[in-house]
Image (spheres, helix red, strand yellow):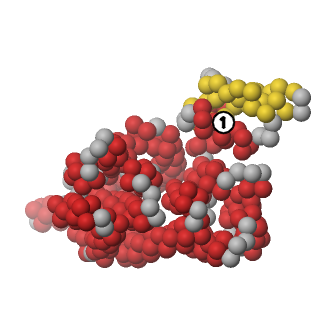
């Protein structure tokens, strides 16, 4: 993000305020939300060293400090907001009521701030921009849709349904990963205990005999030395490295793009990311098309939901193709992400005027594919688990028993 300096006239005095934004237009909108004074001018400026250091510390600790609203609480509040809006209650009163009644502290804070911004004359979607991390891109896009069409309650109902579906997919994924995760944790604990307490007992025996140790035993002894003497340092290095890695990914687009490319080439993960992305993209796109939003605009909003940068870039070409006059199915075909069957369905929908229905069926298809991957996840991970388990057992067995066999053979040879 760029750094802008705004000159504001407040209470008869001029003051300069720094703000981060993607462009001057966004900086102007954010400044209107945060300050009540008259904005004289906004110009891009050089970020002060102190501000850079402060931003670095904030971004580095953002994973610890930031807390998303609990999905169940957010879905319930969105549905409640839809009901109250449909009943004719003002957005301000609805947000205030939900903020007072909720037990989720993050939700209380966010909805309270949104109510304040609404009371100051700002739209709901603009106010939500300040809480993109807490609310998510999908919530902001659907509220923008509701404001454009004048059917905010319908948009909120649809948003709640989509969030419930996404939440259900997350729950399925967690359930599928529960068994492999627990097995891997148990294996890691067992290996750590063996390295820390069992191997040292054999180490003293090997040192007393001054025997030449085989490679597996040397590896075990080096691991034991590392765990028992530098374990805390290794843990600290891992934590710091992870924090720096997260910082680089969150703040440098090129690094984030490269990391996403790696994920799209990784066994099993690539299919999960691919079908989860296409499922969400087609789901949002179908809802927007049904609401009568123009295709180019619906594509723009749907693409903004995508987290994977390589997939986002490829799907962005669809919007460019449509703007240049190409049909939707031609643009989708050029990405190489969609099967021929899907392209034919979209083409048939365009020709028959039932594009919204066809895109809805495509969304159901990708949801089915994603569900199938999640259901078979535990089975797909089993070979990897067996390989890791076998490697650990083999290392321990060879590392401990090979020297003992050599010593036994030496004793028998002497006799």
Q: Residue at x 63, y 50 (%)?
A: 126
Tell me the quarter of the image containing the C terminus. Answer: bottom left
Name above or below for residue 172 compared with residue 263.
Answer: below
Q: Residue at x 75, y 27 (%)?
A: 40
Expressed as whole percent of the image width and height from the top left, the position of residue 17 reads 74, 31
Category of crowding for the residue at label 1, using alpha-carbon neighbours closer than 10 angstroms: few (below 14), some (14–19), many (at least 20): some
Q: What SS does tag 1 mark?
A: helix
Residue 306 appears in the rendering: no
Label 1 belongs to which residue?
28
Report the front residue among 183 and 140: 140
Q: Residue at x 73, y 56 (%)?
A: 118
Name above or below for residue 250 compared with residue 329.
Answer: above
Judge left or right: residue 270 versus residue 95.
left
Judge left or right: residue 409 versus residue 112.
left
Tell me where residue 29 sits by quadrant.
top right
Residue at the outermost right position: 12
Judge left or right: residue 127 versus residue 72.
right
Residue at the outermost top position: 46
Tell me where residue 339 sits by quadrant.
bottom left
């Amino acid at each position: 993000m760029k750094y802008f300096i705004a000159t504001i006239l407040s209470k008869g005095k001029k003051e300069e305020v720094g703000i981060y934004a993607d462009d001057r237009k966004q900086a102007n909108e954010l400044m209107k939300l945060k300050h009540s004074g008259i904005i004289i001018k906004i110009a891009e400026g050089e970020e002060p060293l102190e501000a850079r250091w402060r931003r670095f510390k904030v971004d580095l600790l953002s994973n610890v400090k930031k807390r998303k609203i609990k999905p169940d609480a957010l879905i319930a509040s969105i549905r409640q907001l839809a009901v109250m809006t449909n009943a004719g209650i003002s957005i301000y009163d609805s947000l205030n009521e939900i903020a007072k009644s909720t037990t989720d502290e993050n939700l209380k804070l966010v909805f309270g701030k949104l109510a304040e911004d609404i009371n100051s004359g700002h739209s709901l979607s603009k106010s939500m921009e300040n809480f993109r991390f807490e609310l998510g891109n999908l919530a902001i896009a659907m509220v923008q849709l509701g404001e454009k069409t004048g059917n905010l309650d319908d948009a909120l109902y649809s948003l709640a349904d989509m969030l419930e579906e996404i939440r259900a997919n997350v729950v399925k994924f967690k359930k599928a990963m529960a068994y492999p995760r627990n097995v891997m944790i148990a294996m890691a604990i067992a290996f750590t205990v063996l390295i820390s307490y069992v191997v040292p007992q054999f180490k003293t025996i090997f040192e007393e005999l001054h025997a030449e140790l085989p490679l597996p035993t040397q590896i075990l002894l080096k691991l034991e030395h590392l765990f028992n003497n530098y374990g805390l340092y290794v843990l600290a290095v891992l934590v710091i490295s992870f924090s720096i890695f997260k910082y680089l990914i969150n703040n440098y687009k090129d690094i984030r793009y490269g990391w996403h490319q790696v994920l799209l080439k990784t066994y099993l993960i690539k299919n999960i990311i691919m079908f989860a992305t296409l499922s969400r993209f087609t789901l949002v796109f179908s809802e927007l098309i049904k609401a009568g939003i123009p295709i180019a605009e619906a594509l723009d909003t749907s693409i903004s939901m995508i987290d994977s940068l390589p997939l986002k870039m490829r799907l962005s070409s669809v919007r460019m193709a449509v703007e240049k006059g190409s049909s939707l199915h031609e643009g989708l075909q050029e990405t190489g992400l969609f099967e021929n069957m899907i392209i034919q369905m979209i083409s048939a929908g365009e020709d028959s005027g039932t594009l919204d229905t066809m895109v809805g069926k495509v969304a159901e298809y990708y949801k089915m594919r994603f569900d199938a991957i999640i259901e078979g996840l535990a089975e797909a991970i089993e070979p990897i688990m067996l390989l890791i388990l076998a490697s650990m057992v083999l290392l321990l067995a060879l590392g401990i028993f090979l020297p003992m066999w050599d010593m036994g053979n030496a004793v028998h040879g002497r006799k």
